[in-house]
Structures are given as C-alpha cells and as structure tokens.
Amino acid sequence: MELEKKIAILADAAKYDNSCSSSGSRRETPKGGIGHGSLGGICHSWSADGRCVSLLKILLTNYCKYDCKYCYNRRSNDIRRAIFEPKEIAYLTYEFYRRNYIEGLFLSSGIFRSPDYTMELMIESASILRKKYLFGGYIHLKIIPGAAARLIRKAIELADRVSCNIELPSERSLMLLAPDKKQAEINNSLIEAYNYKMEREKPVSTSTQLIIGASPESDKSIIKLAEKLYSRKLIKRVYYSAYIPVNNDGVLPQIENPPILREHRLYQADWLIRFYRFSSEELFEENENLPEDMDPKMSWALKNPQFFPVDIMRASYEELIRVPGIGLKSAMKIISARKYGTLDERGLSKLGISIKRAKAFITIKGKVLTTIRDNETETIALSKPKQLSLLSR
Ligand code: SF4
C-alpha cells in the first residue's frame, strides 16, 4: 500500500484518542540533530475535528485483535486497515518536522498480534527517529497494557510522554465494553512506568484517557478515580473523552451526540482538584453528578455561602482562589498588589481582574458589592460555558 493511503487511514483512525496534549518536556537538540522538545518549543493547535495537530498523531496500525465495543478500529468492524513499518513512521515524522508541519509525534496503535509485538514496533519507530534522524523533538508513545516491563522502560527512555489509557472508569464497565482488556494489566503498566521514572529520575510524564458516557459511572466516581491517580502520582494528566457513538451495539448507550458539556465540566472539576485545592468530596457534597448549568466552582460557592464574602485585602491565597472568577494568577496578583495599597474595583481592573463573577463573593473596602441572592441569575449566566462543540476540545 502507498504511504499516502496509509497516512489517510491511520491518521483518521487515531483521532479518537484525546490524550495527546504535549507539555513538560525539556529534551535538548542532539548534536547535529533536529528538533527540540523544550517547554517553549512545542505549541498546540486544534484540527477541524478538535484534535491536537501540532503533533503527527497517528496509529502504527488499526489492525486490532481486540474488540472493544465503543471503538471504530475494533476487530469486528469491516474497515480499511493498514500498518506502517517503523522506518516509515520515523521518516514521516522527520519529513513533516523539517517542513514545519508538526512539532512532534504521538504514536498509538491497535493491538497487532500481541501487546509485546505492537510495543516493539512502536519502540523501533521512536528509536529510528532518535538514533538515525537524531530527532530531539517531542515523542509521545502509547503504552500497550500487558506489554512486558522491559518494553515499558524502553518506551520511557525514548519518549517525552507516555500514556496508558484506562478507558473506562470501573472494572465492571471494562469487562463489559472492552472484554479483552484487563484492569490489572493497565494498573501494572502505570505502576511500572511510575517506578521506572522514579528509579531513573526520568522527566517523562504519564497521561491517561477516560471515556465519558459510554458506561454508567457518575461524575463523582470519575473524579474520585482521577483524584486517586493524581495523589498516587501515577498520572500527570487525565484526559476526559466524550463518548462518540461510532458503533451499534446493544451494550452501548443510545445517544446521538457526544456528551461534550459533561466532558467540559469534568475538566473544570479536574482543574479544581489539581490546582485549586478542592477535594472530590467538596465538589460532590450533594450530587453524584456535576451541574450542567454552571461550572463546579460556582456551584460549590453557591452551596457554601458561609465561606463568603471574603475581604479582598485580608483573604488568604487559599480563600481567594475559591472565589468564582478569581483564578490562580489573579489571586497572586491581588496578594502582591495589596502590599502597596488598598485595592478597590478600579485597582482590580488595572490588574486585569474582572470582578463580574466575583462581586457577590467578596468585599472591597469592607463593603459588600452585591449579595449572592441579588446576583444569582447573573452569576449563573456568567458561569455558563460559551458554545461548546467537538471543535472546542
Ligand atoms: S484495543 Fe480496543 S480501543 Fe484499542 S484499538 Fe483495539 S479495539 Fe480499539
């Protein structure tokens, strides 16, 4: 098969994996080589279907011996199939990089023959790229659950990021929708990757993907799982991927459109856990699912009026970042600016901080600007997401 045809098939087949955002790499350009993966060297853009395109995002193959119910590439689907040779992947990445089309490679794969065999081909691709082409750019390799520990280690040696998709939030759902996959194998792969990175002090980050809406788990159980993975440091980033109905199967939910708003709310909740010091228990005090009509921080603030208002001149950093509309950078700016004088609305505006959303939750010069009740309609409206679609991912 011609290379162009393979690219068309295997780039299209890769679009269902969200866990490809690149970040955190500090790889230098090898002597006489090409590309670098430093923090400033990778930028992201998003393709028409909402996927990251600054990386060559491609599958080694869409042949797969597994039959995951939700997957376009599953064994039982009658689709066009192709497989790259490792040298083709390395050549394509190098050529695309030279032409400035991409900043790096995101390589995933269906399970071809066995997890070990697939992983070996992926490793060979990355190895040719690094050794023959002296490529110092960003490489993200998918770890195939069930692959041998020695292969996971090799992948970590070559990549800037590895990911191992958990896919479904519970073992029960995994058994139902991805019967060939084993949760123990996924967990072992994540633990092996973590142990090796720690042992060798490798700055390689690990991510995973959870499919949202293909199985019945609540937002609470999804966020609790993410919280556990973050606290154990097994994962740097969880990607939430709204279930896209591509197959007809009795065990799959009958939906027409992917639950994009739910995905968006989960990202917001994830952000609150990772950076805003919220716990999953706080976000889900009353409900198992996040509200759709407002973001989770606003929802928490409205349910916890005893916490507010906080005084803009006296509130601690921890208190400020809980105010809807005040982000991490804004909180730092407030703390820094108030050392030099009293902050009022104008002063906040000069710092680039809009208090539209925050005004029901703060006092300025000791005065309440508006009450939560008076402001409720406006605060909720401000909290609604702008138009969301697959394009916004
Ligand atoms: S292992 Fe499952 S999700 Fe991955 S390509 Fe094969 S069928 Fe699809």
Image (cartoon, helix red, strand yellow):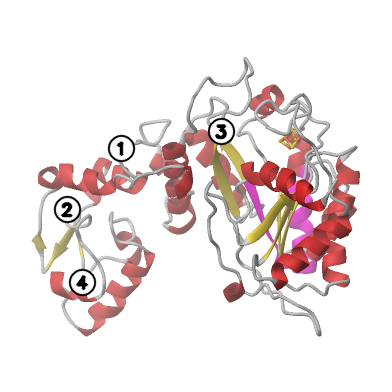
Crowd around label 1: few <14 · some 14–19 · many ≥20 (10 Å): some
Q: Which residue is mark 2?
A: 360
Q: Residue at x 71, y 24 (%)?
A: 175
Q: Quadrant of the N terminus?
A: top right
Checking the image for residue 348, the label placed there is 4
Tell me the magenta residue range: 188-208
Determine the CA span between mark 4 and mark 2: 15 Å
Q: Residue at x 74, y 53 (%)?
A: 107
Q: Residue at x 37, y 69 (%)?
A: 329
- The percent position of residue 64, horizontal first and vertical second, equals 81, 35
Mark 3: which amino acid? Ile
Crowd around label 2: few <14 · some 14–19 · many ≥20 (10 Å): many
Q: Earlier in the sequence, mark 1 or mark 4?
A: 1
Above or below: residue 118 compared with residue 57: above
Q: Is residue 159 magenta?
A: no
Mark 2: which amino acid? Ala
Q: Are marks 1 and 4 in contact (CB under 8 Å)?
A: no
Q: Which residue is mark 1?
A: 293
Q: Which residue is mark 3?
A: 244
Mark 1: which amino acid? Asp
Q: Earlier in the sequence, mark 4 or mark 2?
A: 4
Q: Which of labels 1 and 4 is toward the front?
A: 1
- The percent position of residue 25, horizontal first and vertical second, equals 66, 69
Q: Earlier in the sequence, mark 3 or mark 2?
A: 3
Q: Earlier in the sequence, mark 1 or mark 3?
A: 3
Q: Secondary structure at mark 2?
A: loop
Determine the CA span between mark 1 and mark 4: 27 Å
Q: Earlier in the sequence, mark 1 or mark 2?
A: 1
Q: Earlier in the sequence, mark 3 or mark 4?
A: 3
Q: Give the image quarter of residue 338.
A: bottom left
